[in-house]
Image: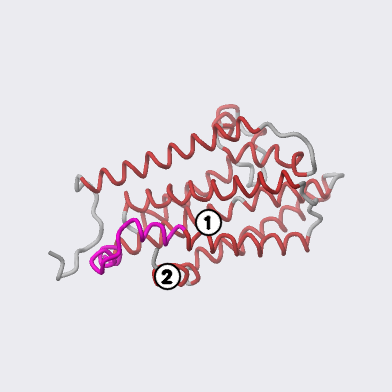
Amino acid sequence: MSWKLFKYEIVNLTSSVITIIFGFIFPIGMVLLFSFAFGGEVTDTSALHTQLFIQFALTIPLAILLIGHAVNYASELESGAALRFKLFGHSERSLLVSKMLANLFFLTISLAIYTIVVSLALQVNAPSVGAVFTFLGFYYIFSAIVFVLGHAIATIFGQVGKVMGTTMTLYFLLMILGGMMGVQPDNLPDGVRHISMGLPLYWITMYLNDFWVGGSFNFVPLIITTLGLAVLSIGLFGLALWLRKKGKIKQGAKPAYYD
């Protein structure tokens, strides 16, 4: 990995309005909004705040990696910048590694700020040691999977407008299925609820709350659904590479000096 590429990616992230709004401001705002809206309807306020904290922490990788990274990469493809990087001797692997590390670094900062602000503003229960390791382990694995998914979508569509429309739709769809839009997954229609149960977000947002304070947690569904999402993302990424190799997708205009 090149340090210059890493710094370039950080600059890209900090200058992205979408990343700043949806990766930093939106999660904090939604937690505070829902805590105010539903706080009077429950007796255990700290349990509600803890569940909201867990739920909206998961929107950060969706915003930064699924939307932000995908749109930034699509912009590079559309402008020909990604191709110019290769012409200047940067391999696709080094570019991909730089992007992933920069995005995960940025994600960590966002998560830290989110945790500090929400913990100070609300009554979030202190987690058990096992819950901390479980949450962070899943968090970064899920983030890596989402990064691959966003990269695949950007590679397939290659245009900012199409990529933004696709990732934004997927973002809000995952939020709905994960119970982050005010309706718990178990209250969704049966068919939709079964789709929700096929996602790792369901098992984290619905059942990690008890484990957070020392209760039990069934890891099997979480592992299976996470693996399923990983296979789907990697498969889509492989499809994107195959389509590009076959010349079925366009990767931006070639520079005049390209041979």
Based on the displayed image, in which of its 4 quarters is residue 256 positioned?
A: bottom left
Report the disc number at residue 3.
2
**How many tags in the picture?**
2
Q: Is residue 198 left or right of residue 160?
A: right
On the image, numbered disc 1 is attached to which residue? 63
Q: Is residue 205 left or right of residue 241?
A: right
Q: Position of residue 211 (x, y in %)?
A: 75, 39
Q: Main secondary structure of the magenta part?
A: helix
Q: Position of residue 128 (x, y in %)?
A: 77, 46
Q: Position of residue 7 (x, y in %)?
A: 44, 71
Residue at 54% from the left image edge and 34% from the top image edge: 225
Based on the displayed image, in which of its 4 quarters is residue 179 positioned?
A: top right
- The amino acid on which the numbered mark 2 sits, given as a three-letter code, is Trp
- The amino acid on which the numbered mark 1 sits, given as a three-letter code, is Ala
225 over 256 or under it: above or below: above
Q: Is residue 104 left or right of residue 163?
A: right
- What's drawn in magenta, residue-wise? 79-100
Give 92 or 28, whichever is nearer the viewer: 92
Mark 1 crowd level (few <14, some 14–19, many ≥20, 10 Å Cα): many
Please check the rendered image and state whether residue 93 is part of the magenta-colored stretch, yes or no: yes
221 over 48 or under it: above or below: above
Q: Position of residue 159 (x, y in %)?
A: 32, 57
Q: Secondary structure at mark 2?
A: helix
Based on the displayed image, in which of its 4 quarters is residue 255 positioned?
A: bottom left
Residue at 20% from the left image edge and 44% from the top image edge: 246
